[in-house]
Image: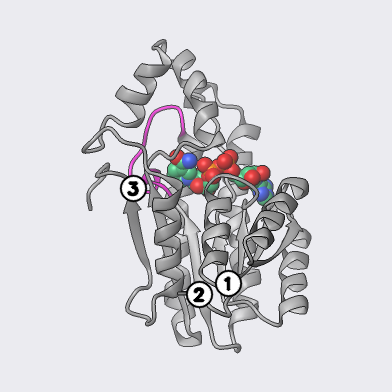
């Protein structure tokens, strides 16, 4: 197992990509803190991990709350004695053209992705520094590299995460912290399922056309990226044995955006 005896905290882990990473980390031997706004759903993930023989705890955490983030990390350290891996994954989407975008919708998306990732990073580094280091992993997107219409706050936040990831790589190196960002293409999760009818309405095209001509248009094979594809990269980045892999962005997208 690639993550034996490691302690990981994953935000937004009650469903979707975060859940897949939590379950994959547990299968690889890590103890996993499942942090989410939705505590009941996080508890269900923990029960499932335990049914499969893993070790996990649920944390109620809104990543935009400084206190909730700090308390969540403190609870992990007090229960398990440290922290080796933190995955800043929690995220939301909002579909609107810029000229009609409400400031509060802009702010909310930036707040969850970018401000939330800062709070999670700071709390993680305070545990990792002086304790042998660790791995920071950010959930970016192909939208960390490219823009699409109607998603300006998401695109701006995901580009911002690249900068945060690289800053952590530079500052954290001396303390044994590696920092990398995963940039998936479209994965069928509730976040994406919600956008399909929204984009269909906003663009005046069918839902099938949104999938084929918008979401998967630039892939090499018209395929969605899977939860397993993304969680495999997350395991690889967490387990990587040296500082050779730091400050990097890994695009996992069926060829949409080749770098
Ligand atoms: P999802 O909507 O299925 O799950 C997101 C989870 O985050 C939910 O459990 C939700 O409760 C939680 N969450 C939302 N706001 C939160 C907050 N303030 N504090 C704590 N938890 C919060 O979404 P997903 O598709 O699994 O996306 C996860 C991450 O992956 C996001 O950062 C997203 O931008 C990124 N991503 C997704 C795709 C995709 O196609 N699904 C592609 C690229 C990147």
Q: Residues within 10 Å of mark 3 (few under 14, many from 20)?
A: some
Magenta segment includes 154: no
Identity of the residue drawn at 48% across and 84% down: 176
Q: Residue at the spot x=36%, y=30% of the render?
A: 215
Whether tag 2 and tag 3 are in contact, CB under 8 A, the answer is no
Picture quadrant of residue 6:
bottom right
**Mark 2 or mark 3, which has the lower sequence index?**
2
Q: Nearer the viewer, residue 69 or 194?
A: 194
Kindly indicate the quadrant of the structure image that contains residue 181. bottom left
At numbered mark 3, what does the secondary structure look like: helix, strand or loop? loop
Categorize mark 1 by other alpha carbons within 10 Å: few (<14), some (14-19), many (20+): many
| Of callouts 1 and 3, the N-terminal one | 1
Q: Nearer the viewer, mark 1 or mark 3?
A: 1
Residue labelled with disc 1? 30
Q: Check disc 2: other Cα within 10 Å, few if <14, some if 14-19, many if 20+.
A: many
- Residue 77 percent location from the top left of the image: 72, 77
Magenta residues span 141-151
Residue identified by numbered label 2: 3
At which x and y percent is residue 103? 62, 32
Residue 237 shown left or right of residue 68 in the figure: left
Asked if labels 3 and 1 touch by Cβ distance under 8 angstroms, the answer is no
Whether residues under marks 1 and 2 lie with C-beta atoms below 8 angstroms apart, the answer is yes
- Specify the quarter for ligand 1: top right
Q: Is residue 5 left or right of residue 82?
A: left
Q: Is 145 in the magenta? A: yes
Above or below 196: residue 220: below
């Amino acid at each position: 197992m690639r993550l034996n005896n490691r302690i990981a905290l994953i935000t937004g882990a009650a469903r979707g990509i975060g859940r897949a990473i939590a379950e994959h980390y547990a299968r690889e031997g890590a103890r996993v803190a499942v942090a989410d706004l939705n505590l009941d759903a996080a508890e269900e993930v923990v029960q499932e991990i335990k049914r499969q023989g893993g070790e996990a705890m649920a944390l109620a955490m809104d990543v935009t709350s400084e206190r909730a983030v700090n308390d969540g990390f403190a609870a992990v350290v007090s229960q398990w004695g440290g922290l080796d891996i933190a995955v800043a994954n929690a995220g939301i989407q909002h579909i609107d053209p810029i000229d009609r975008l409400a400031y509060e919708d802009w702010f909310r998306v930036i707040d969850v992705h970018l401000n939330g990732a800062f709070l999670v990073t700071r709390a993680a580094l305070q545990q990792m520094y002086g304790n042998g280091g660790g791995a920071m992993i950010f959930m970016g997107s192909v939208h960390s590299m490219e823009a699409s219409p109607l998603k300006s706050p998401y695109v701006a936040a995901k580009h911002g995460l690249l900068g945060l990831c690289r800053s952590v790589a530079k500052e954290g190196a001396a303390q044994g912290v590696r920092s990398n960002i995963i940039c998936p293409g479209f994965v069928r999760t509730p976040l994406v399922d919600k956008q399909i009818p929204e984009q269909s309405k906003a663009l005046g095209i069918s839902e099938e056309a949104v999938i084929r001509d918008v979401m998967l248009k630039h892939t090499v094979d018209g395929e969605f990226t899977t939860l397993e594809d993304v969680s495999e990269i997350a395991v690889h980045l967490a387990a990587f044995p040296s500082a050779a892999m730091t400050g990097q962005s890994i695009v996992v997208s069926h060829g949409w955006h080749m770098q």
